[in-house]
Image (cartoon, rainbow, N blue to C red):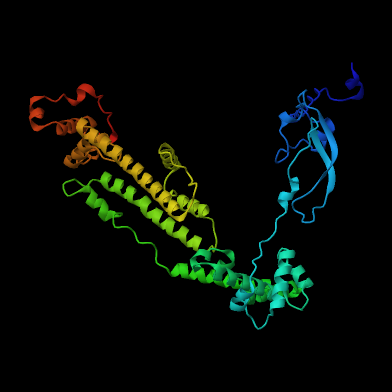
Amino acid sequence: MDAKDILGLPKTPLPIAQEKKSRPHKDSQRKPDGISREVYALTGGVAPLMPSIDVSQLKRRPPSDEKITWQWLPFTSSARKDNLQLYHWVRVVNGVPPTGDYSFAKYNKSVDVIRYTDEEYAKYLTDPKWTKEETDQLFDLCERFDLRFIIIADRFPTPRTVEELKDRYYSASRAILVARAPSPGEVASHPLVKEPYNVTQEIERKRALSMVLSQTKHQERKDAEVLAEAKRIAESRMAARAAEEPDLPVPPDIGPESAERAIGPGDTISPSNVQVHAAAAAPSTSVIADNSSTLASLRMLKVYLRTYALEQMVQAASSSAGLRTIKRVEQTLQDLGINLKPKVPTKAVCAEHLELRKEILTLLNLQKQLQYKEAEGSSFRDGSYGDMPGTAKRSQRAVDQDRTFVPDTISFGVIPGDRGVKREQKRKGPGRASETPSSPAGAHKRPRKMKASDL
């Protein structure tokens, strides 16, 4: 007697405790050498995108014969024109301070502003809207503020817009460049000459931008509805135009006529030949139809990737083939050392890649037909043509044609044994029937039971 008997509980075994789900083992990342635990914890164990210093350099100690100190030394920078002397901490090795220019002076970049003479101004830069003093001030400010025209417009003494200042500077610089060049072709590739500043377009751009930025939410929703309606109308027109365009023409070497020409005038046309050539022509026709439908669907897209179009065309070309044939095509491409997807998918490359896939598919179909024909030829040579699948036995068809109709005589009182003897005599030739005597019916058959109708 146990606790279950006392409490009146059924004596059922306890359910087996489910095994605790094992947690996936986390790969422990080892802390790199030379980095303290606190600093490594701040990074969260994620390596930086670009290493700031080589790990091998972290614990490298200076040679014993070098004595390194840090000293507070003066320096000058070539970026300054006033020869200002400043101080900073410098790493000194064996008491020899470093020499050379200030390390950050290389970042001092300035714009090369074209200057002109009085004769060049009088000959090429005369403008009724600008005086020479204003032009000189403009070029000085451009050199001082590195073509920051917002600041230049703020510092300019007379009220001028940013577009007017830009137009004056770029037009004067372009005129001086063209005048100083021996021939116009030498400066044709210069940015100021190749891409001239268009003040009208800049003013219109800013006006349109200010209109867009000043729109209300209601105006934005209304514009979005108008654009969506325009997109819908454009798509419907493109679909109608694509439907009106005729389908791609079928090449003349594909079809039943070409299949008959491939058979030849001297060959016999058998059902197997017709089936083989129809099977060879059907994939090509279906491929052309799939390609035309794919092209029509791609026309609906205004912008699409060339690789996406190639994938769609490959799928359309391989739709009629089985999975095994597609794998054989890919294996053939790999054997030829050709990538399954072109690395540079230009229009010409994609067209050649698709054409190569079609030719490989045609080659595989021809190899399949060749194997079928070789098997059929070997069956002719071995005399087992009747064993080929899909063909009726020639001997059986001849017997069925030569056999005459024999009525069933059992209802006329003929003994079943006699009917078997007659059939046996009919199978044999007339000469054999006379030579071989027939056995009596009763020799091998039991006598028939008498019926009431026989009495």
Residue 248, image x and y in percent?
Answer: 38, 62
Measured as percent of width and height from the top left, residue 171 is found at 62, 73
**Residue 5 vertical placement versus 372 (above, below):** above
Report the residue at 10% width, 29% height from top.
Answer: 433
Residue 402 higher or lower than 428, as above or below: below
* Rendering quarter of residue 379: top left
Q: Is residue 221 in view?
A: no
Taking the image as shown, residue 324 lies to the left or right of residue 79, namely left
Give the position of the C terminus as an image quadrant.
top left
Where 372 sits versus 199, above or below? above
Is 132 above or below relative to 78? below
Determine the residue located farthest toward the bottom in the rendered image.
Answer: 128
Residue 117 seen = yes
149 or 414, nearer to the observer: 149
Residue shown at the point (42%, 68%) measured from the top left: 245
Frontmost residue, 374 versus 273: 374
Q: Is residue 156 left or right of residue 200?
A: right
